[in-house]
Amino acid sequence: MTGEARPTRGPLLRDVAERAGVATGTISNVLHHPDKVAPETLDKVQAVIAEMGYVPNAAARQLSRGRSGSVGLLVLDARNPFFNDLAAGVEDAAGAMDLAVLLATSSERADRERMYLDRFEQSRVDGLLVTPVGGSIKQLRAISDRGTPIVLLDRLATTPGFSSVAVDDIEGGRLAGQHLVDAGCRDIAVVGGPVTLEQVRNRLAGAQRAAEAAGVRISHLATARMAADEGRRVGFEIAATPPAARPDGVFAANDLLALAILQALILAGIRVPEDVAVIGYDDIAFAALASVPLSSVRQPSYQMGRRAMELLAAAMASGDERRSTSQQVVFMPELAARASTMR
Amino acid sequence: MTGEARPTRGPLLRDVAERAGVATGTISNVLHHPDKVAPETLDKVQAVIAEMGYVPNAAARQLSRGRSGSVGLLVLDARNPFFNDLAAGVEDAAGAMDLAVLLATSSERADRERMYLDRFEQSRVDGLLVTPVGGSIKQLRAISDRGTPIVLLDRLATTPGFSSVAVDDIEGGRLAGQHLVDAGCRDIAVVGGPVTLEQVRNRLAGAQRAAEAAGVRISHLATARMAADEGRRVGFEIAATPPAARPDGVFAANDLLALAILQALILAGIRVPEDVAVIGYDDIAFAALASVPLSSVRQPSYQMGRRAMELLAAAMASGDERRSTSQQVVFMPELAARASTMR
DNA sequence: CATGATGAATGAAGCGGTTCAGTTCCGTGC
DNA sequence: GCACGGAACTGAACCGCTTCATTCATCATG
């Protein structure tokens, strides 16, 4: 027997070099600086590569180059179209710069956020885009201090040192609140949570401001997540409230909640918008398609993704002066009024 | 000046070792086999790690270990809730096995698929889950031959050597077609494309079978993508057709198309289901929430993701006997009848 | 008390690339 | 004829970690 115990991995760069009769450095050049190689050599080497089925090892390359050529993107909820659009923006921008995007979802959980931030840092991503759950500012600061540029997404960076791309959520909340007030609501319920999410706090605060200015009653119904299951629960809760005590306007902190609330209300026989007006936030594509087209507050999700990636790229390029470069981009939200608040 | 030119990367494992007064191997053990280290040593080393802010380099680890501890997941469309659910299933299952999931989207484009498959192979993923665009079977075969186990998703593996998890799309198409026939439709339009997607071909074929068996007219309206923009286009096209020539039943090959068609029809003043009945495929959460709740064909997306990851794990574990292990899991679709076809 | 066994720690040899200071070889210019 | 510059290629020295054969103590056993 020829007895080889090794796992028989594929051919290595050095095997290609040997077979092609050149040095390893030349193969590397063929792969990354073809202009530095004589045409015939190039052809021959490429032929050998194809013939042997050589596949470069990314880990080895990254180790010797010292950079990974990738950025990490950590979002709150992979099943929320808002984040899908945002991610699409990031990926398009990153692709144009030859950067790979590593995508992860914290599911709004601090422990998952911590874990993915760790993973990303261990992978030596060249930069990080994060929608923070809240409470991990310390870790973010540490990562940033160790030299990885970070851009905060969908959240205004209050602490200096971070760039951020966000929408003015207080204004967005005000827009929604004012819209309900204008629709004649006298008792508004704002739905959302957990309040550790800054987005939630700001949207609620904005709505509150509008309601109070108009002398309209406003209350908060807390949710554990910003997802449909919680919306359904709250929706039925509202429906079960005696008509006298029931709010006549609902502002949900995102469309997933709003759509689920809408569905629950209608199933329970409550008329929207006649009995209860409903408005959401994000203006995801499905909002306009809902049984009663859902009013919402629009965020330029895709654009936010693109812009964030651009900020990050700038920070990555500027190296050490990072700290001073930090800048905040704030987009303005827009009201998208539809049937669910028209009365 | 103290003059250090190096980029001042963070501390290395060897720095930690030196500072803690132990050998590098011991640090490695602290990190991965804490049980093999004496309690006091463990404490001290962990303290030093925390103090120095040491972050292991994943590339180096992967290089020396020879395995990446991650799997690649390549889906057709990151903005389609069906794939989000599927991905969630994969991630949950992978997480339980301590595997990281690398997610990428081909956007139904063969070139992007090729590129991501390359990336994944270079990253030496331990396994691959792929929803193929079609046409890259050769590349998949090559990757598989080089030793990376592959599970095909949402597509029955016809070629041997691949495991697969899929729904019986022909049956699903038949279900949808039969349902339209039962609803009294005499002229059905099936919408979807490109036909390079096997899912599309099968769903259409199933519907065709049902229609022909019932002697009902059936035609195909092709789309370039399985996304909302194309649905809108086709929807308006249908609406613009003179009533006499207009189909009275529409089967869209996924819910994104169906919802957009629904919206376009209603905007154009066509009544659903009275004038045109509409049914989709996937039964995404938003289907039930639509203006006219959308009938659909349900696939157990999350379960499919889980199951696929389990198959992959099995293939990864069995090493060389891979080829013989290949198995096909086929889920059965279910009809979800709602208002959009009730007449 | 010699003999293993067991537990803890060591440190050098990889893992598979990239880089870059050198070496060769040629064509130019004077 | 000779010095010089550049193009093409070479190959050893890393990159930062894991592994594992060894060494060193310690301790129970007959």
Image (cartoon, coloured by chain):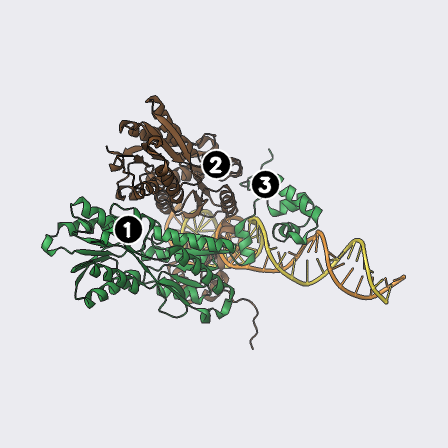
Chain colours: A green, B brown, C yellow, D orange
Residue for badge 1: A256
Residue for badge 2: B134
Of residue A51 and residue B138, the one placed in the foreground of this image is: B138
Q: Which mark is residue B246?
A: none
Amino acid found under the numbered disc labelled 1: Leu
Foreground label between 1 and 3 = 1
Q: Secondary structure at mark 1?
A: helix
Residue B312 rendering spot, x and y as whole percentages: 42, 39
Q: Give how far apart the Cα atoms at labels 1 and 3 are.
A: 47 Å
Residue for badge 3: A53
Q: Horizontal placement of B42 versus A286: left or right? A: right
Q: Quadrant of the N terminus of chain A?
A: top right
Which numbered disc, 1 or 3, marks the residue that appears first in the sequence?
3
Amino acid found under the numbered disc labelled 2: Gly
Circles 2 and 1 on the same subunit:
no
Circles 2 and 3 on the same subunit:
no
Residue B154 rendering spot, x and y as whole percentages: 40, 36
- Crowd rating for badge 2 (residues with CA inside 10 Å; few <14, some 14–19, many 20+): some
Q: Is residue B188 above or below residue B227?
A: above
Pointer 2 and pointer 1: residues touching (CB < 8 Å)?
no
Q: Chain of mark 1?
A: A
